[in-house]
Amino acid sequence: MDRRNVTGLNGRIHEALLNSHTGFLIDVACDATRYTVVKPYALFDPALLTGAPATCTGCRTILDAAPGAPRHPADIARECADILLADADTRGYPPALDDEGLRLALARIAPGTGHLRPLFERLARGVYDPQNSYRTQPLYALIREHLADTLTERALKIPANTPKVLVRYLRYTGGELQAPVGAGDRLTCDGLASGHWPRGTVTAVENSGILVDFHDGYPPRRYRRHEVPRCFAFKVDRAPYTNTGACRPTRGASSRTP
């Protein structure tokens, strides 16, 4: 997540929190929400970025906070995201990034989060509650962005000495990357023509290509290096690699699916 100053609609300068892969404005540091910088349903104009210091009182209070003062919202969001990620890793698969998946996770984890329990419970109530929409919870978008950033970092890591074979990776909160493929990764076949989007697990990466097991009772299928980008739509989010280079069991996915 990037932190850059932007000029708001009223001329005040805020610290903005931006998607590090698309430059999309997520929120501002103070409680004023992103709509102090862009009008509802309007896109963020990169021309609003500025190198001038923040003049918004709320943002300045956060940026100049003395020890013991309220923490930066992005730092709180990072702590919440780390808790959600640790819970998902324990369960053996990546965290869901859709609204309902996050609501269920927030509600389930809340009792064991100590001083963050009121925040987790408030966020869980806010999702899909017409009177208290998750969009009114400033930390919700930041938590999801931190989760997406961590999953992106994982998608770009593969075991050492693995031949370089690239495939598309779609970030849930926006942005597309070319990610390397490693043994244990899950790939989704391109089903635009057939309407069928099977997923397979990579069992080996070789200089000539990859082996993929579709768990259908047949031997793993071989794809040459140049066939991988054409045959597979994207790499699926996953739990982290273990020290041995193998992956944990994975169920479900948090990548966007067609």
Image (cartoon, rainbow, N blue to C red):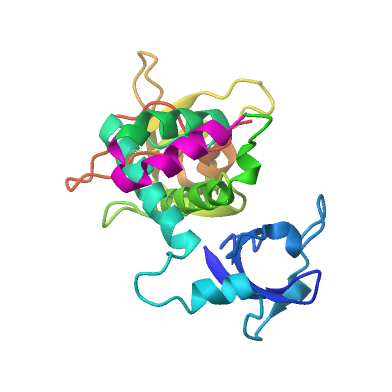
In this view, the residue in front, 169 or 91, is 91
Q: Residue at x 62, y 27 (%)?
A: 191
User: Would you identify the image quadrant in which residue 94 lies?
Assistant: top left
Tell me if residue 202 comes above or below residue 219 in the rendering: below
Q: Residue at x 38, y 39 (%)?
A: 238
Image label count:
0
Tell me if residue 49 comes above or below residue 133 in the rendering: below
Q: Position of residue 164 (x, y in %)?
A: 40, 55
Q: Residue at x 52, y 52 (%)?
A: 145
Residue 196 falls inside the magenta stretch: no
User: Would you identify the image quadrant in which residue 184 lies?
Assistant: top left
Left or right? Give the position of 92 relative to 137: left
Q: Position of residue 119 (x, y in %)?
A: 44, 44
Extreme bottom residue here? 52
Q: Position of residue 212 (x, y in %)?
A: 39, 31
In this view, the residue in front, 227 or 90, is 90
In this view, the residue in front, 220 or 50, is 50
Q: Quadrant of the C terminus?
A: top right
Extreme left residue here? 244
Q: Position of residue 15 (x, y in %)?
A: 61, 72
Left or right? Give the position of 72 relative to 193: left
Tell me if residue 194 comes above or below residue 28 in the rendering: above
Q: Is residue 202 visible?
A: no
In this view, the residue in front, 36 or 1, is 36
Left or right? Give the position of 135 relative to 188: right
Q: What segment is highlighted magenta in the picture?
A: 112-128
What main secondary structure does the magenta stretch of the protein show? helix
Q: Is residue 10 visible?
A: yes
Q: Residue at x 27, y 57 (%)?
A: 161
